Amino acid sequence: CSGFQEAIGFDRTLGNSAKEAFDQIHLGQALLWSGNLQAAAVPLEKGLAIAKELGNAALAAEAQVHLGLAVAFTHDPELGRSMCEEGYRGAVRSEQREVEIAADLHGLRIALLRQDRQAVESQIERCGAHQHHLTPLVYRRAFADLQKRARDFLSAETTLQRQAAVDQ
């Protein structure tokens, strides 16, 4: 991550706001994928603010998708879900398939956090539609892990529902 921080310093020195937004967002993503959700929020917020100031909808959508996951896990699951979904819509408008995929993976992770069966089922279907486009290794690994967690969640919930029906 120090490479991103160094690049951000150069971007500022050169007055290249677009590159700074890009580097802030990618620093945030690196922190996010490494599991440091709290620290990821700061550069993602900075990148989002710069992207909005520049009117760069594509960068703003990317930042919002990843910031949504950080917010969901560190502050407010519903707000994070909403941010992620708004970023997804922006990614669709700006035709950023990789950001759409990240939004769906994050949406599934948030649905599992919220223990929302309907959302888990919907998100697993959305993620499955990307199966042939999961080219980054981190996406393939995340999807495999989330798919297993979703199956376990859905199976456990079905078992609880059956037990409750028997008990009545």
Image (cartoon, grey):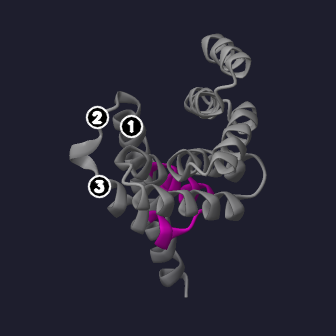
Assign the C terminus to one quadrant of the image: bottom right
Q: What stretch is highlighted in magenta?
A: 105-120
Q: Where is residue 46 in the image (x, y as percent from the top left)?
A: 73, 38
- Chief secondary structure of the magenta span? helix
In this orientation, which residue lies closer to the viewer: 62 or 129?
A: 62
Residue in the picture at 33% in, 63% down: 125
Dividing the picture into quadrants, the one containing residue 8 is top right
Residue at the disc numbered 2: 135
Residue at the disc numbered 3: 128
Task: Say left or right for 35 vs 151.
Answer: right
Residue 75 visible in this rendered orientation of the protein: yes
Query: In the rendered image of this protein, does residue 162 appear above or below residue 84?
Result: below
Q: Residue 139 carries which label?
A: 1
Question: In terms of sequence position, does the residue under pointer 3 or pointer 1 come before the other?
Answer: 3
Q: Where is residue 28 in the image (x, y as percent from the top left)?
A: 63, 32
Residue in the picture at 35% in, 49% down: 97
Crowd band around label 2 with a 10 angstrom C-alpha radius: few (<14), some (14–19), many (20+): few
Q: Mark 3: which secondary structure?
A: helix
Q: Does the CB distance between marks 2 and 1 fall below 8 Å? A: yes
